[in-house]
Image (cartoon, rainbow, N blue to C red):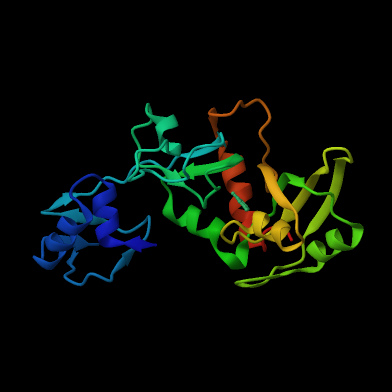
Amino acid sequence: MERLQKVIARAGIASRRKAEQLILQGKVKVNGKIVTELGVKVGPRDKVEVDGIPVEKEEPVYYLFYKPRGVISSVKDDKGRKVVTDFFKDIDKRIYPVGRLDYDTSGILLLTNDGDFANLLMHPRYEIEKVYIAKVKKIPTREQLKQLEKGIMLEDGMTAPAKVKLLSHDKQKQTAIIEIRIHEGRNRQVRRMFEAIGCNVMKLKRERYAFLDLKGLNPGEYRELTPHEVKQLRALALSGGGK
Ligand code: URA
């Protein structure tokens, strides 16, 4: 369900602010009835009209993108830095990222114009499993890795249990490559978890998102999700994020 003014704006009829004015002026109908309140939410089956003309919904699209490092997970940036939608210039739909990866993090990012789908996947209750590969400075001890697994105290509270695997280490350079699987999606969570055990993250990549990986894609490339993958993601989220 989405706010009426957002649906009107998304269809390209007016800006969100202008859409609010149209609603207040009594020019918008939902299922044949004039609506003049701004809080009303509509779903995919509701019929919305502006000035008697039906609002055509954009056909939903779903993409799996290999985000390179040095790109913002946003649709625009005030400072003119590269954003993820710059890689989708030939797509004429209003897509946006499902959640975010840090500027310096690479890896899987989903983009869609389907708000319900995005909200479902991002909802903390339904958080999907994500697998990250981190290169860190300093080789963590077994106890420290256990701590990450059990949960560690961050500024915004304890982290939920995680799965952690030391993949390799370089004694001379004092670096380690670690796989970490988490279900949460707090801001800079993986970096903060490693900082909490005294290991700075030098490089971070999201390798998997639920059952999806980056096979066949180079950084900056994307592919459409298949209808089956979309269905599976919805089902997975609703069943508890694959925990
Ligand atoms: N955790 C982080 O620290 N950064 C990301 O981009 C994703 C997860």
Q: Quadrant of residue 91?
A: top left
Does 93 sit left or right of 172 as displayed?
Answer: left
Quadrant placement of the N terminus: bottom left
Q: Position of residue 67 (x, y in %)?
A: 55, 36
Instruction: Decide: is 7 above or below 66.
Output: below
Seen at 47% across and 45% down, the residue is 73
Q: Nearer the viewer, residue 225 or 110?
A: 110
Q: Position of residue 239 (x, y in %)?
A: 67, 62
Instruction: Decide: is 139 above or below 144.
Output: above
Instruction: Decide: is 178 above or below 122.
Output: above
Asked whether residue 208 appears in the rendered view, the answer is no
Seen at 53% across and 29% down, the residue is 220
Instruction: Decide: is 155 above or below 222.
Output: below
Seen at 42% across and 46% down, the residue is 74
Does 9 sit left or right of 142 as displayed?
Answer: left
Does 191 sit left or right of 165 as displayed?
Answer: left
Q: Nearer the viewer, residue 214 or 196?
A: 196
Q: Position of residue 75 (x, y in %)?
A: 38, 43
Seen at 37% across and 29% down, the residue is 89
Q: Position of residue 197 (x, y in %)?
A: 77, 61
Q: Quadrant of residue 189?
A: bottom right
Q: Nearer the viewer, residue 45 or 155?
A: 155
